[in-house]
Image: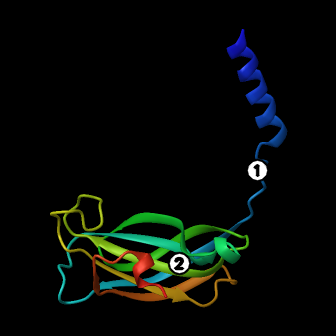
Amino acid sequence: MRHVLMIAAAAATLCAGGCVNEDVTLYGVRVTGRVQVAPEFESAGVVQLGLYFASAGEGELAFLVDEIELRELGAPGSVDEWFLVPLDEREGLLVYAWLDVDGDGVHCAVGGAEEPAGLVAVDDFTDHAVSFALVLDQACAGPEALYP
């Protein structure tokens, strides 16, 4: 009986003070551009392309590079994709990519290949469109290492 009362008390506390999900407004952004690999790296592989917010949070809780979405695209070259970007207090837009040279789905796994990456900041995406040119020229660098 004691356990039932504890569970009931915990449930009542969660219901009274639980999180309330807010509505999320999504903004469709067409991302077009080109991903190239620097000549010093292997150029065969699958491009992993992601959109990130440059910054999020406020005050002591502020942080850089907040992922929106990461997708697998195929070989390096032209990009024409639609992303849904949440509209909220986060700022700036970054396009980040890396090349999965060894096909393991992990960026620079221990004992794996040295995989190139790159990042570019996008100034404006208010017209539902972003255009970029990105060269993957940094070995084993995540988006946090490349920005700012």
Find residue 12 and report its image quarter: top right
| SS category of the residue bearing label 2 | strand
Image x and y of residue 88, in percent: 73, 70
- Sequence-wise, the earlier of marks 1 and 2 is 1
Residue at the spot 24% in from the left edge and 74% down from the top edge: 115
Q: Height in image: 51 above or below 41? A: above
In the rendered image, which residue does mark 1 sit on?
21
Q: What amino acid type is highlighted by mark number 2?
A: Val
In the picture shown, does residue 124 fall above or below 103? below
Place residue 64 in its image quadrant.
bottom right
31 with respect to 99 (left or right): right
Q: Which residue is mark 2?
A: 31
Q: Which of the pair 135/92 is nearer the observer?
A: 92
Residues 112 and 3: in front is 3
Outermost residue on the right side: it is 16
Disc number for residue 105: none
Q: Is residue 131 above or below residue 9?
A: below
Could you classify mark 1 by the number of other residues whose Cα lies within 10 Å: few (under 14), some (14-19), or many (20 or more)?
Answer: few
Q: In the image, which is nearer the foreground, mark 1 or mark 2?
A: 1
